[in-house]
Image: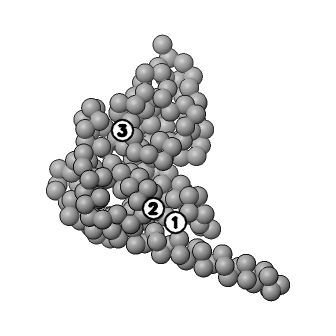
Amino acid sequence: MASEIQIRVNERVHNVTADPDTPLLYVLMNDLELQGPRFGCGLAQCGSCSVLVNGSETRSCVTPVSAVVGKSVITLEGLPSWYAQQKKLSKTPALHPVQQALIDEQAVQCGYCFNGMIIQAVDLLSKTPHPTEAQIRRAMNGHLCRCGSYPRVIRAIERASHAMTRAVENTASERLAQESRAAEGVEE
C-alpha cells in the first residue's frame, strides 16, 4: 500500500508517495526524474543503477525505498556538490573528479554503464584514495561495460585519484595562506 515516505537525495529532502517495497531506482527515475541511475538488469548484477547510500555504493534496483529513510542518497547528479562538501572546497566543481577523468580518458562509449562506473569509483576513492590497479580491478568487478572500455576506466580512476590529491593539497595550502594572512592582520 502506497504511503508518504521522506527521503534525502542529493542533500534535499523529498516527500514521495510509494509502496515501501518500491525499488529506490523507480522512485529516483519516476518521481524525482533523475537520469543518472539507470535500469540495467533489475537483479543488482550490472551496476547501472548504482547510487551512494551514506557514502557506500548501493544497487538501487533491489533496494526498497523504505531502506533509505533517514539516510543520505547521492546520485550522479549530486556528486559534484557532495565532493565539494566532503573535501571542504570553497567552490563546487562542475563535475566530480571521477566524472572529469572519465571524459578526459575518453572512457565513455555508449554511456550505459557510466553511472555505475562513476559511483563505484567514487566509493573506492573515498575509502582508498591511492588504489593500486589490482584494487581498482577488484572494486570495479561486477560493473558491466558492454563496450569493453575497462582499460580506459582504470586509467581514469588513477587520473581521478591524482586529481583529488592535488585538489586537497591546494585547498590545504589556500587555508594555510588565509590563516597566515589573518594572523598578520592582512584583509582579503
Give x and y (percent) for residue 37.
37, 43
Circle 1 residue: 93
Q: Residue at x 75, y 84 (%)?
A: 181
- What separation in Å lies between label 1 and label 3 (alpha carbons)? 26 Å
Residue 32 visible in this rendered orientation of the protein: yes
Circle 1: residue type = Pro
Circle 2 residue: 96
Crowding at dot 3, Cα within 10 Å, few <14 / some 14-19 / many 20+, comes out as many
Q: Observer-nearest residue: 42 or 52?
A: 52
Q: Residue at x 54, y 18 (%)?
A: 3
Q: In the picture, which quadrant includes the C terminus?
A: bottom right
What colour scheme has been applied to the protein in the rendered image?
one colour
Q: Residue at x 46, y 51 (%)?
A: 77
- What separation in Å lies between label 2 and label 1 (alpha carbons)? 7 Å
**CB atoms of marks 2 and 1 within 8 Å:** yes
**Residue farthest along the top direction in this orientation:** 1
Res. 176 image quadrant: bottom right
Circle 3 residue: 59
**Residue at disc 1, secondary structure:** loop
Give x and y (percent) for residue 86.
56, 58
Residue 153 disc label: none
Q: Observer-nearest residue: 64 or 130?
A: 130
Residue 187 visible in this rendered orientation of the protein: no
**Residue at disc 2, secondary structure:** loop
**Residue at disc 3, secondary structure:** strand
Crowding at dot 2, Cα within 10 Å, few <14 / some 14-19 / many 20+, comes out as many
